[in-house]
Image: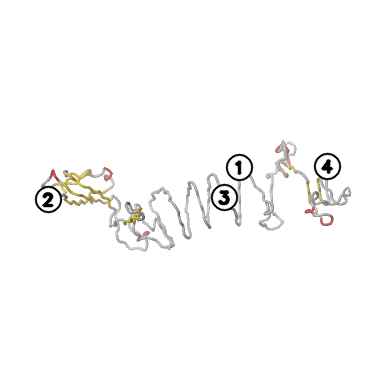
Amino acid sequence: MRVQNIQTGMQLHVASATPGLNESPATPGRDPTALGIGPAAIPGSIYANGCVLIGNPLAFPAIAEATCMIAPANPVVNPLAFKTPSILKVTNRLTRPPNPFDVWFGDPAGLVGVTMNTATINITETVAINIATPTINITGVKNQAGAQNDVGAQTETGAQVQSGTKVISGSSKDNGKRATTVLRADKIICPNISGRINVQSWKKFDIPHPNKKGYRLTHVCVEGPEAAVYIRGRLNNTHIIDLPDYWQGLVDYDTITVNLTPCGKPDLSLYVKEIKEDKIILSSDHLTQVECFYQVWANRIGPELHVEYEGESPADYPGDDSLHSIVGYHYDVRED
């Protein structure tokens, strides 16, 4: 039978029977009882007992791949339908407000799997996206713009690259080792930091004890009103202290001081005769037999250090602080 248009007044059923049709009673396993039977039938409903293919049949050329198969219309056979911009669209336009069950895949009694092979997924969400899952696995680069709030445990494996500002409210704890590449910035300002700040903390190192099992060894760094470097050693039958090559361009030679301690025998005549870029020349009544311990100190080249200044925080420092890195201010902020 070929007709131009078919209009069905109530429901359209394919491969089914309803009461009064061929004198066949309704059978739940065969007929769409969910669409209503008799006076309870929902008008304008369509039921198909088999597969439904909408659009271009060439998109599914060999076998029935799903109960419902949808593709764009064939542009040759039906060019008007082919002009539609979308293959599938769901909307609440001019009907009712949105609710979480407008589009529903599966239920607790009938779980389904979802596989998507897509070029791009664009999501514009006006309220929230809620995901409840034991694990989310992402392979590839993840780019995020905007705020991110994490509640609960978070485990990350592999490299992580972050550009832009990161704000943490509350405690942050790292378990295990972290490798960090430090980038020098001209100036770092932290105007708002909550919690206890260790601006007067000791600079320590803490290591396993080298010769007592079950013990540890901790030392505190020496502090002073300068950015100082030093070398030390012992001279034996020489009057020359060789300076490291890297001191040239690193230290201010006008700030060099030398401490000498004779060893083996007294030498009250021992003194510093001359300081050069590569060495320090000593002199003594026992010139060829000088034996002593030495320490050589010098200030690094850089801006003047203002040891005392008026202010409420390191942000009030009056001089050039481009070379400064302050524990508890630029890094190592700890909560009580």
Q: Please name the amino acid that badge 2 sits on.
A: Ser
Is residue 286 in sight in this rendering?
Answer: yes
Residue at 63 percent across and 44 percent down: it is: 116
The furthest residue to the left? 285
Left or right: where 243 falls relative to 195: left
Which numbered marker is on residue 136?
Answer: 3
Left or right: where 158 falls relative to 183: right
Residue 20: image location, x then y, percent: 88, 51
Whether residues under marks 3 and 1 lie with C-beta atoms below 8 angstroms apart, the answer is no
Q: Please name the amino acid that badge 3 sits on.
A: Ile
Residue at 61 percent across and 50 percent down: it is: 123
Residue at 13 percent across and 44 percent down: it is: 289
- Report, in whole angstroms, how far the alpha carbon at label 2 lies from the one at label 3: 77 Å
Residue at 64 percent across and 47 percent down: it is: 114
Determine crowd level at label 3: few under 14, some 14-19, many 20+ residues with C-alpha closer than 10 A.
few
Mark 2 highlights which residue?
269
- Report, in whole angstroms, how far the alpha carbon at label 4 lies from the one at label 2: 123 Å
For mark 2, give the secondary structure: loop
Which numbered marker is on residue 4?
Answer: 4
Which numbered marker is on residue 119?
Answer: 1
Between disc 1 and disc 4, the foreground one is 1
Between disc 2 and disc 1, the foreground one is 2
Whether residues under marks 1 and 4 lie with C-beta atoms below 8 angstroms apart, the answer is no
